[in-house]
Image (tube, rainbow, N blue to C red):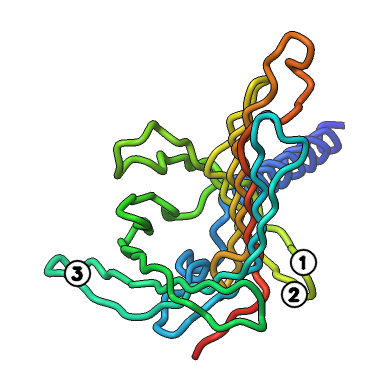
């Protein structure tokens, strides 16, 4: 009887140990989302480019429908420099065109500063903390920590996704929520997705002010604001 009890207890303890190890492993996989080199989500080789379809809807008070504008943008890594501290700065050239039948017109340059633990994007003299490393779903950061704007809480969504945009499919997609503020009077949400070896594949920005009159507050009717999306259609290296 003692030997049987000892066997049962030993087997039970062994199963508990296996379950505990499995639980820890599952928890680690769920909380930490860093199986790849994080810099692979933002390739910065000279000549690397991405072309996007851009769609913008602008809502104005008193208008029954938004004004819709469509165009294409191309971001290309143009050149690189480093300072005495070893911080590398990449200059990105942005060009636009109305359709594939038009020529590209360069409209601006912006920079990306590559640090050991982060990527800092500076567009129109407004620095923004785009990504922090290592990639972990428990990590949050203030995207506006390098400028004078109000705090903007950013975070990684847990896990990776398979995403299809148009005819292109992307695995291990990283999703970054840059802003998620919603109420009955407004909605400010920005979500970006990054593909391995590609960079930014989609950018969805919403900034709505909802109707606040007594007869429509809480209805979700957009009074003013805009909704802008950028979706990848092509990428490569020249």
Could you tell whether 129 is left or right of 67 in the image? left
Occupied quadrant, residue 31: top right
The quarter in which the N terminus is drawn is top right
* Picture layout, residue 71 above or below residue 101: above
Which residue is found at the position 77% from the left and 16% from the top?
Answer: 216
Task: Check whether the beta carbons of the residues at disc 2 and disc 1 lie within 8 A of each other.
Answer: yes
What is the distance, in whole Å, between disc 1 and disc 3 at their CAs? Answer: 37 Å
Helix, strand or loop at disc 3?
loop
Q: Please report whichever mark, 3 or 2, sits nearer to the chain's N-terminal start.
A: 3
Quick one: 162 or 33, which is closer to the camera?
162
* Picture layout, residue 52 above or below residue 179: below
Helix, strand or loop at disc 2?
strand
| Mark 1 residue crowding within 10 angstroms, few (<14) / some (14–19) / many (20+) | few
Locate residue 97, reporting x and y percent.
57, 74
Q: In the rendered image, which residue does mark 3 sit on?
A: 86
The disc label shown at residue 164, or none:
1
Q: In the rendered image, which residue does mark 2 sit on?
A: 168
| Mark 3 residue crowding within 10 angstroms, few (<14) / some (14–19) / many (20+) | few
Looking at the rendered image, the disc whose residue lies closer to the viewer, 3 or 2, is 2
What is the distance, in whole Å, between disc 2 and disc 1 at their CAs? Answer: 6 Å
């Amino acid at each position: 009887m003692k030997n049987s009890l000892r066997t049962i207890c030993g087997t039970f303890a062994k199963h508990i140990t296996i379950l505990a190890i499995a639980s820890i492993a599952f928890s680690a996989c769920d909380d930490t989302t860093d199986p790849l080199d994080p810099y692979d989500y933002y390739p910065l080789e000279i000549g690397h480019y991405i072309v996007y379809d851009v769609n913008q809807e602008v809502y104005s008070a008193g208008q029954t429908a938004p004004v819709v504008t469509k165009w294409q943008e191309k971001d290309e890594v143009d050149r690189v420099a480093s300072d005495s501290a070893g911080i590398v700065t990449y200059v990105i050239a942005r060009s636009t065109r109305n359709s594939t039948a038009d020529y590209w017109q360069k409209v601006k340059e912006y920079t990306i500063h590559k640090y050991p633990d982060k990527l800092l994007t500076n567009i129109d003299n407004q620095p923004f903390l785009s990504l922090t490393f290592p990639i972990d779903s428990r990590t949050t950061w203030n995207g506006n920590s390098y400028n004078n704007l109000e705090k903007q809480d950013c975070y990684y969504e847990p896990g990776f996704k398979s995403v299809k945009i148009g005819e292109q499919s992307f695995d291990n997609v990283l999703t970054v929520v840059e802003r998620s503020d919603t109420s009955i009077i407004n909605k400010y949400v920005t979500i970006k997705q990054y593909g391995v070896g590609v960079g930014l594949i989609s950018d969805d920005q919403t900034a709505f002010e909802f109707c606040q009159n007594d007869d429509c507050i809480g209805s979700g009717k957009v009074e003013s604001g805009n909704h802008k999306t950028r979706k990848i259609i092509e990428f490569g290296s020249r």
